[in-house]
Image: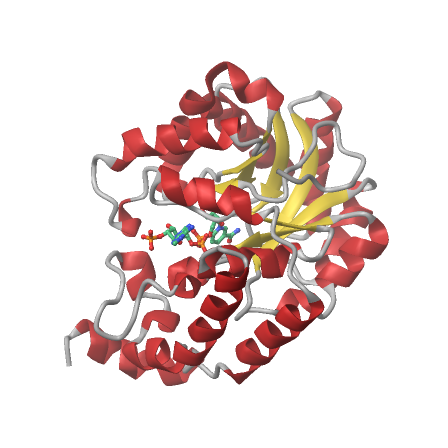
Amino acid sequence: MRYVQLDTPKPISKIGLGTWQFGSKEWGYGPDYERRAAEIVRRALDLGVTLFDTAELYGFGRSERILGAALGNDRSKVVVASKIFPLLPVAPVVQQRAVASAARLGVDGIDLYQVHQANPVVADTTTMRGMRSLQDVGLVGEVGVSNYGLRRWRFAEAALGRRVLSNQVRYSMIDRGPEEDLIPYAEQAGRIVIAYSPLAQGFLSGRYDATNPPAGAVRRANPYFLPENLERGTALIATLREVADAHDATPSQIALAYVLRHPNVVAIPGASGVEQMERNAAAAEIDLTDDEYAALVAAARAFRPVTGLAAVPRMVRARLGR
Ligand SMILES: NC(=O)c1ccc[n+]([C@@H]2O[C@H](COP(=O)([O-])OP(=O)(O)OC[C@H]3O[C@@H](n4cnc5c(N)ncnc54)[C@H](OP(=O)(O)O)[C@@H]3O)[C@@H](O)[C@H]2O)c1
C-alpha cells in the first residue's frame, strides 16, 4: 500500500474503502452482504488500507454501525471518516450529530468529519463553528468537506480558522472536473482530494454492456449505465483493457491508477466482495507510463456520454423496458 505524503496524525492510504454499499438496499447486494461487508473491512485492514469512509446517511446509520463493528479494536489504528448530512447544519446540530455518529461507529473520536455537501442556505461560518468546538473537545480530528467547489472549500477553511483537510468529490477518468482547480489547490496547499465513484460505480470495470447492465436502484439512476452510454464506452473500455494487459491488471485497477497518479488524491472505491477489495488495494502499486496516461486521457476525452436533461427520457424508457 502507498500513503499520502502529508503531515497527518495517522497515515492515509492512497486506496481507502467506501462503504455507502454497507446496509444500503439501493445497491441491490442482498441480505448476505452484511457478512461480506465485514470480511471486506478485515481484508482491507490486512492490506494496509487505513482510510474508511462512511456517512450518517448511508443506510440511515447502518453503514456506520457495520463499519464500526467490523473494525473492532482496530478502530483506533485507522482513519475513520464520516459525514454529516447538512439538513440544518447549525453549530449545536453539528455537535449532536457527531456524537450520534461516533456512538454508532463505537469510537471516542471521528478522525475525519466531513460536511456531506454544501448547504445552500446555512453559511459555513455557523457549520464550522460547530466543527471547531468538536475539534477543541477532541471528538473530531480533522475536518473535511464534500462536493464543495474551490471557493467554498477555501471559505470553509477561513470560517474554521484551520485547515479543512479534504474535499470528497466525484472523480474518475470520466469525471475529470477536479483536475481543473481542486487537485491543483490540494497540491499547493497540502490538502487532499478524496475521489468518490472512482470506478464510475463500476462502469469503468468493463463488466457491463448494453445487454448486461448492473442491477440495483443506484445504478439504474446513473445515466452512464444507459444502454446507449454503455455502447459509447466500448472504445474507452478497450483502451483500459489494453493498458491493463501490459500491467497484468484489470480495467478497474487501471482506472484507479489513473486518479491516484496525483500525489494528493486518494480514492475510496466501494466493493461488492473481498476479491474486489484486494484488487483495488493492489492498484495503489501501479505506475502508469506517460504514454499510457496520455492514451487514457485521449480515450476518456473521446467518450461522449448522454447526460443531464438529454438522458432523462432515455432513462424513463430504459426503466419501462422499451
Ligand atoms: N460524498 C459523496 O457525495 C459520495 C457520493 C458517492 C459515493 N461516495 C463514497 O464513495 C464510495 C465509492 O463510490 P461509489 O460506490 O459510488 O462508486 P465506485 O467506487 O466507483 O464503484 C463501486 C462499485 O464498483 C464495483 N467494483 C469495485 N471494485 C471493483 C473491481 N476491482 N472490479 C470490478 N468492479 C469493481 C462494485 O460493484 P459491482 O461488483 O456490483 O459491479 C462496487 O460496488 C462510496 O462507497 C461512498 O463511500 C461519496
Q: Residue 22 at x, y = what percent? A: 36, 38
Q: Residue 124 at x, y = what percent? A: 69, 49
Color style of the picture: secondary structure
- Residue found 33% across the figure and 58% down from its top: 218
Q: Is residue 85 visible?
A: no
Quarter-of-image position of residue 142: top right
Quarter-of-image position of residue 83: top right
In the displayed structure, 235 sits above or below 84; it is: below
In the displayed structure, 192 sits above or below 151; it is: above
Q: How many marks?
A: 0
Q: Is residue 270 visible?
A: yes
Q: Residue 21 at x, y = what percent? A: 37, 44
Q: Left or right: where does residue 316 sit relative to residue 230?
A: left
In the displayed structure, 137 sits above or below 168; it is: above
Q: Left or right: where does residue 70 sit relative to residue 124?
A: left
The N terminus lies in quadrant: top right
- Residue found 55% across the figure and 67% down from its top: 173
In the displayed structure, 134 sits above or below 87; it is: above
The C terminus lies in quadrant: bottom left
- 60 or 124: nearer the eye? 60
- 283 or 157: nearer the eye? 283
Q: Left or right: where does residue 154 sit relative to residue 23?
A: right
- 277 or 180: nearer the eye? 277
Q: Residue 314 at x, y = what percent? A: 28, 82
- Residue found 53% across the figure and 66% down from its top: 243
